[in-house]
Amino acid sequence: MTKPVAVVTGGAGFIGSHMVDVLIGRGYAVRVIDNLTGGHRANLHHLEDNPDLSCTWEDIRELEPTSPVFAGARFVFHFAGIGDIVPSIERPIDYMDVNVQGTVRVLECARAAGVEKFVYAASSSCYGLAATPTREDHPIAPQYPYALSKYQGEQAAFHWHQVYGLPVNAICIFNAYGPRVRTTGVYGAVFGVFLRQKLAGTPYTVVGDGEQTRDFIYVTDVAEAFLAAAETPIVGERFNVGAGNPQSINRLISILGGEVTYVPKRPGEPDCTFADIGKIVAKLGWKPKVAFEDGVRIMLSDIRRWNDAPLWDPESISKATETWFRYMGKQRA
């Protein structure tokens, strides 16, 4: 019996590689597209020689509608894009090019292939400094180019649904964490920063007073939400995905253990992210399974993975965020 085919763009990345794992575990044949700018082959090494996995190391901006990667695909899961927030202030053209125009390329491939469902990886950053808990109908207020680019990619996906009838759903991800989280050279995700600091025995660089809270959601729970959004007959919907249980940065530090140093709070970033997940629970039957403490301990068990990640300190962070403060601070003046 022929296995159903799923395409995962950005499939060598953090969430994308876990999506691949879930799909193969559920009996899908998976085709990965990744240019390895943010992803790593090592994220898929455990699947080497697996006949159900094939990889194309291609830039989504170079895809043509006739791309054979999409032929016969049932689902497309679109994770590919630039995901680091702070550098978007300095490189807005790159972000709009990859996250918007790249998405359009993938949409055209999915349309030409006649896929059953296209699931877009949306970002909770589109809500801006949101009221909490945040529902899917919250006003949109992107605060920086990354957020804008991700929202415009989402708009394009729903436009393709409206105009061309492409079946689309979007999963609006809050603060995903877990194994394989990004360790790129740019200043970004808190786990990548803190785990490297723990390995080095240096203080954790906590932004502000550490009382800000984030709706951390474990990566395998995110992947399960995407599959639910693909397999449902529901189309044309956005679903928030978070744990619905925000955790403070200080709580994370208490689990990790160690000394702390403080860096200035960044303008344009919310004090709290908090997903209202009532819609996805009710309509798709999805709910988070991995408790925050358990997820952090799983990451700590594999902490050596962050040995080659950049080691940040207050001075290097100040330099990396200088442009952010210049432009975002001006908005608040």
Image: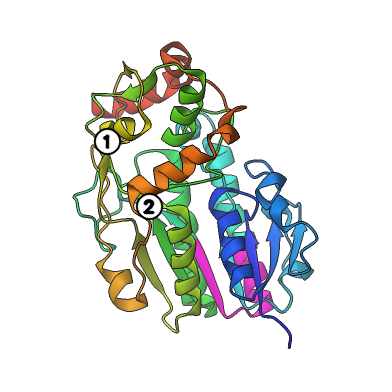
Give me the C-alpha separation between circle 1 and circle 2: 15 Å
Q: Position of residue 177 (x, y in %)?
A: 44, 46
Q: Is residue 50 left or right of residue 16?
A: right
Q: Is residue 93 above or below residue 264?
A: below
What is the quadrant of residue 56 in the picture?
A: bottom right
Residue drawn at the location 45% of the way across and 73% of the way down? 228
Q: Nearer the viewer, residue 306 or 176?
A: 306
The residue labelled by disc 1 is: 251
Q: Position of residue 105 (x, y in %)?
A: 64, 60
Q: Which residues are magenta?
A: 106-120
- Which mark is on residue 294? none
Query: What amino acid is found at the position of numbered circle 2 in the picture?
Result: Ile
Marks counted in the figure total: 2
Q: Is residue 151 magenta?
A: no
**Against 168, is 47 above or below?**
above
Q: Nearer the viewer, residue 267 or 215?
A: 215
- Residue 75 lies, in percent from the top left, at 59, 74
